[in-house]
Amino acid sequence: MLAEQAVTWIKVPRPTFDLVGVVLSSLGLAGICAGVALSLGTVLGVGFIVRGRRAPQSLAERLSLHLLEAPPQ
């Protein structure tokens, strides 16, 4: 009536954790992020400096509040 079930066991190698690989890959990723941030910061900084030097206004004129004149009475 009931058929006997056969169980087959397969030997699987135990997984190993590669700590050195994880550390090296995370350092590589951090280096790439630092390089991208340095490049973007340099490009933006140079762009702001060049744009500021091309502007004819002085620093005081750029930072001061420009109030509207009172209407004539």
Image: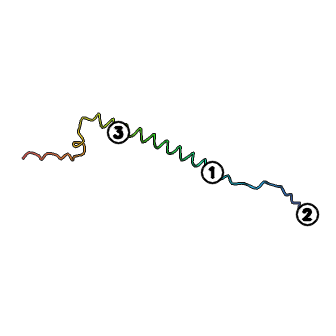
- In the picture, measured across the screen, residue 23 lies left or right of residue 62, that is right
Q: What residue is pinned by disc 2?
A: 4
Give residue 45's position: percent from left, percent from top: 38, 40
Answer with mark 2 or mark 3, whichever residue precedes in sequence. Answer: 2
User: Which labelled disc corresponds to residue 48?
Assistant: 3
Instruction: State left or right for residue 57 relative to residue 23.
Output: left
Q: Indicate the secondary structure of the residue bearing disc 3.
A: helix
Residue type highlighted by circle 3? Phe
Q: Secondary structure at mark 2?
A: loop
Pick whichever, 28 or 5, lies toward us. 28
How far is mark 2 from mark 3, CA to CA? 80 Å
Label 1: how many Cα within 10 Å (few below 14, some 14–19, many 20+):
few
Which image quarter is the N terminus in?
bottom right
Task: Please provide percent x and percent y for residue 68.
Answer: 17, 46
Look at mark 1 in the image and give the residue it sits on: 22
Q: Nearer the viewer, mark 2 or mark 3?
A: 3
Count of residue discs: 3
Q: Residues within 10 Å of mark 3 (few under 14, many from 20)?
A: few
> Hey, which quadrant is residue 53 in on the image?
top left
Mark 1 or 3, closer to the camera: 1
Q: Answer yes or no: do the residues labelled 2 and 3 have beta carbons within 8 Å?
A: no
Task: Indicate the secondary structure of the residue bearing disc 1.
Answer: helix
In this picture, residue 71 sits left or right of residue 44? left
Q: Is residue 45 above or below residue 10?
A: above
